[in-house]
Image: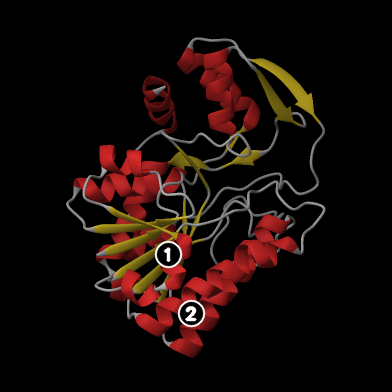
Amino acid sequence: MILILGGTGFVGKNLVTCLHARGEAMRVVSRAPDAAFLEKHAPGTSALRLEQFMADPKAALFGVETVVYLASTSTPGANLDTPWREARDTVEAAMRVLSAVAAHSDANVIYLSSGGTVYGETTASMIAEDNELRPISPYGLGKKMTEAAVDFMARTHGLRTTILRPSNPIGRWQVSVSQGVVGALMRAAQQGAVFNMIGEGSAVRDYFDVRDLSHAIEAVIDNPEASNGKTWNVGSGEGTSVREMLELVQEVSGHEIKVQHTPARSTDVARVVLDTSAIKGALGWTPAHGLRASLQDIWAAM
């Protein structure tokens, strides 16, 4: 049994679909479980509200061998003027769940951090896991602190944990209006709306298919001993600027996108491209989807 916290968010929906396809038994925990989605794409998957999980974690964790923690109420642009809220919104919530797992289960825990924000500004063309963590946004700070909490619970309570730092996953069901360059560009192309480009669009990110992220999580699930105590980057290892992404989406969709420039934000790093050689070497994971093919799949699904 695999328990997925945040199982009906963007990454969660894609992970649940992949795990269902290979016959895994799952239990989804969410603040507002999407029962209709689960019934359509992963029938037989049980769902709990977060308050139900916290009210009786022993029952919720019964038979669970792996806990995948995807839950988050924060976004990269959140809490810019109230950074102290990250501790409550991100770290406290994770600690409550980790404590419940430690008390009632011997499950392996996989925590999804953020390779796009925890490193901050760096001169490295490729960022490896041993790069210093110097986030410049409250969101990145929250992820860094939660990583420390995961490490603390592993050292003091014996939790078996793996931390994954995905860069910028893209794919189906990326519907948030508060984050996701590709989702915003796709909606602008489909609806004839204006795309708000932050700054001049020079920020470089490591975009990769969310299905490949799901397969990386599956690889960790399948190799608990090799993954225990590890922290791995997950991404494509290639950089694409927002301007380049705009051109790609226009080509794939066949629609010209209107652009409105907004002021650059001090909390956005200039470049993030991840070195993923560690997880490739340990688990044999490599991304299977090219960027253009991923964009074509997203457009077709829309």
Q: Is residue 276 visible?
A: yes
Q: Say what amino acid the circle numbered 2 marks.
A: Ser
Direction from residue 69 to residue 205 in the image, left or right: right
Q: Position of residue 110 (x, y in %)?
A: 41, 66
Picture quadrant of residue 208: top left
Picture quadrant of residue 93: bottom right
Residue at 60% x, 34% y: name it.
Answer: 177
Q: Residues within 10 Å of mark 2 (few under 14, many from 20)?
A: some
Direction from residue 33 to residue 114 in the image, left or right: right
Residue on which disc 1 sits: 52
- The residue lying toward the viewer, choosing from 279 and 25, is 25
Q: Position of residue 236 (x, y in %)?
A: 46, 45
Residue at 81% x, 47% y: name it.
Answer: 266
Direction from residue 238 to residue 125 in the image, left or right: right
Q: Position of residue 137 (x, y in %)?
A: 73, 55
Residue on which disc 2 sits: 99
Quarter of the picture holding the C terminus: top left
58 in relation to 236, above or below: below
Q: Earlier in the sequence, mark 1 or mark 2?
A: 1
Q: For numbered disc 1, what is the local secondary structure?
A: helix
Residue at the extreme bottom of the image, as rendered: 156
Q: How is the image coloured?
A: secondary structure
Q: For numbered disc 2, what is the local secondary structure?
A: helix
Direction from residue 256 to residue 122 in the image, left or right: right
115 in relation to 228, above or below: above
- The residue lying toward the viewer, choosing from 87 and 285, is 87
Quarter of the picture holding the N terminus: bottom left
Q: Residues within 10 Å of mark 1 (few under 14, many from 20)?
A: some
Q: Say what amino acid the circle numbered 1 marks.
A: Gln
- Alpha-carbon span between mark 1 and mark 2: 16 Å
